[in-house]
Image: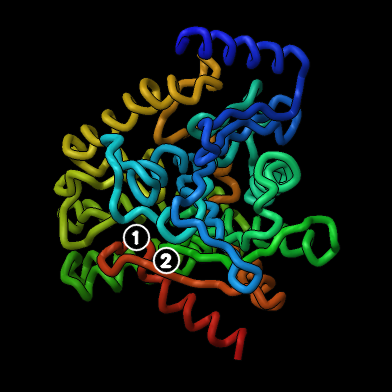
Amino acid sequence: MARQMETRALALLCLALLRGVSAISGGTDDGAERWGYVQVRPKAHLFWWYYRSPQRVSSPGKPWPTVLWLQGGPGSSGVGLGNFLEVGPLDGSLKPRNSTWLQKADLIFVDNPVGTGYSYVEDDALLVTTDGEAAADLATLLRELVTKELPTLQSSPLFLVAESYGGKYAATLGVSLARAVRAGELKLTLGGVALGDSWISPEDFALSYGPLLLQVSRLDSNGADNASKKAQVIRQHIAARQFKLAQYALSSMLTSIVANSGHVDVYNFLLDTGMDPVAVPAMTLPPAYSAYLGSKAAKASVGDSIRDIMNGAIKQKLKIIPKDVVWEEQSYTVYNALINDFMKPRIQEVDELLSYGVDVTVYNGQVTDIQNVIIDLIVQYLIEVTS
């Protein structure tokens, strides 16, 4: 029976592809999970996965919320990392997670942008090159989900929750959705936007990184001065809108910091690189910089494990993943396609969301030094624009 069902699913997939339909989906018999592809542009396919909370209780006065999780990178898989290694119902060993966010909300994970994780393009020329293009694809996905796949989204407040570079996606997508709702083009309630260790102000990060590491004794004064000088170069490039040069300058600054700090772990300044056995990059660092990170043996085992699961048991469960799509936790093809947008700030988008009355929350880990240096600046900014 299982083999017959699998054969039928594959046949339906082939038939759908031959007919050029815009979406194909699957799910569990009880409706607790749904997943699928949406063709957001011709030959560009976004993969999504929805979980309905077993605690779901909704009333007119208090509708049950839905969280759309947006992973960073750019090019890191939300369906794999955010789902199984962070907030989904199962952990990286496919065992129930007691702390899952599913206890408080329905969850949607998406491999965004196209080319990430299970999402794919039939031509690399179709990869997004700007945050705005990524937001447009996500908006197309949500329109499909609201009208066809998940009509409960029409009455469930949607919260965009992001980490790292995903914060840029959340800000741009949030603005796109808010505009569409205000124009009457989309029946959806945007409950709020949450930005975790968000990369929405790269300039502030660059200027603050050296001083923070000096304060926690991971850099001496010479190392901090060197970092600050390189940060000024980044600032100049951003001011001149030379964003690709700013990204190269960022790589140079980070490489220098790692060398002068004894290889500080950018996700936990209490540790050195390779000491944390469960760390998975929240924001992918430039390849040129990553070469200087030292031993990754401890992290590699985690990456290999989730990679095996996603290309094995999970791919078999979902049944609709094309055979030639190989899941990776990080797509450098996607990363490089966004190279010209990587250092662009998204503060104005946050300002616009606040002007619409959309709640914006900023959260961060206390020892994640790669981005927590800008949190106080962002909070102060939010206070100023709302006062």
Indicate the secondary structure of the residue bearing disc 2.
helix
On the image, which quarter does residue 218 sit in?
bottom left
The residue drawn where x is 45% and y is 41% is 76
In the image, which disc is placed on residue 205?
A: 2
Vertical position of residue 38 compared to residue 255: above or below: above
Residue at position x 67%, y 29% in the image:
44
Please tell me which residue is depicted at 17% across the width and 44% down the height of the picture.
277
Q: How is the image coloured?
A: rainbow
Examine the rendered structure and indicate whether residue 303 appears above or below residue 130: above
Q: Are marks 2 and 1 in contact (CB under 8 Å)?
A: yes
Residue 382 percent coordinates (x, y): 55, 80
Is residue 87 rendered to the left or right of residue 96? right
Can residue 260 be seen at all in this image of the molecule? yes
As drawn, 385 above or below 10: below
At 65% from the left and 11% from the top, the residue drawn is 14
252 left or right of 168 in image: left
Q: What's the CA distance linking mark 2 and mark 1? A: 8 Å
Q: Which residue is labeled 1 in the image? A: 370
Determine if residue 285 is in view. Answer: no
Rendered-image quadrant of the C terminus: bottom right
Name the spot of residue 43 as percent of width and height, x first. Answer: 70, 25
